[in-house]
Amino acid sequence: CLASKSFYRAQDVSIEWSPMGHGVLIQAHTDVDATGTSYYGGTSLYLLVIDKNQTDCGSCSQIQLPKEGPIADAKWEPAKGEEFIIIAGTVPAIAAIYNLKGQLIYNFGAAHRNVISWSPHGRFLA
C-alpha cells in the first residue's frame, strides 16, 4: 500500500501530485456545509505522503488551513516538491507555505489573492 484515505462526505475531490511523486494534495469539497457557516459548501485539504522506503503505508493528514473558509488554490513547489502553498479563507485570503509533514513554514498574511503561480524552477512565486 502506498497510502490510502476514504472520503465519506465529499461530493468531489481534486488531486495534485508533487513533482517528484512522493506526495499528493487532495482537496475535498462538499456541496453542503455541515456547520452552516457557508452557503457554498465546505472544503478541506489532505496531504498523503508516500513512504520512500516502501516498508509501510504512507501517512495521511488533514492540513490545518491558515484561515477558515474556502480553499482558493493549492500548488506544489515545482523544483523539488517538498513544499506547497495554500491560499485559503474568505477575502482577504491568507497564503501560507507548508512542508511535507504538513507543518506551517511561513504565513504570508491576508491579502486579496486567489491564484498561485510558481516560476518553472521554483525560485519565484506570484
Image (spheres, grey):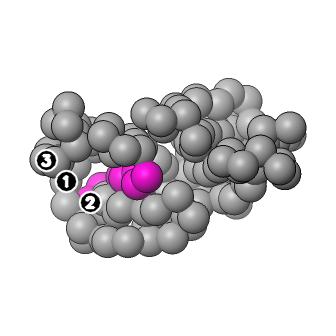
Horizontal side of 74 relative to 102 (left or right) equals: left
Quadrant of the rendered image containing residue 39:
top right
Circle 3 or circle 2, nearest the eye: 3
Instruction: Give the mark nearer the N terminus: 1 vs 3.
Output: 1
Q: Nearer the viewer, residue 17 or 38?
A: 17
Q: Residues within 10 Å of mark 2 (few under 14, many from 20)?
A: some
* Residue type pointed to by label 3: Phe
Instruction: Give the mark nearer the N terminus: 3 vs 2.
Output: 2
Residue depicted at x 58% and y 30%: 15
Under tag 1, what secondary structure? loop
* Residue type pointed to by label 1: His
Image quadrant holding the C terminus, namely: top left
Which residue is disc 1 drawn over? 112
Horizontal side of 60 relative to 105 (left or right) equals: right
Does the stretch in magenta take in 102? Answer: no
Under tag 3, what secondary structure? loop
Image quadrant holding the N terminus, namely: top right
Q: Nearer the viewer, residue 79 or 83?
A: 79
Under tag 2, what secondary structure? loop
Residue depicted at x 58% and y 43%: 23
Residue depicted at x 37% and y 44%: 80
* Residue type pointed to by label 2: Pro
- Inter-mark Cα distance, 1 to 3: 19 Å
Does the stretch in magenta take in 86? Answer: yes
Q: Residues within 10 Å of mark 1 (few under 14, many from 20)?
A: few
Which residue is disc 3 drawn over? 124
Q: Which segment did they paint magenta? A: 82-92
Instruction: Give the mark nearer the N terminus: 1 vs 2.
Output: 2
For the residues bearing labels 1 and 2, Cβ distance under 8 angstroms: yes
Which residue is disc 2 drawn over? 92
Mark yes or no: residue 45 visible.
yes
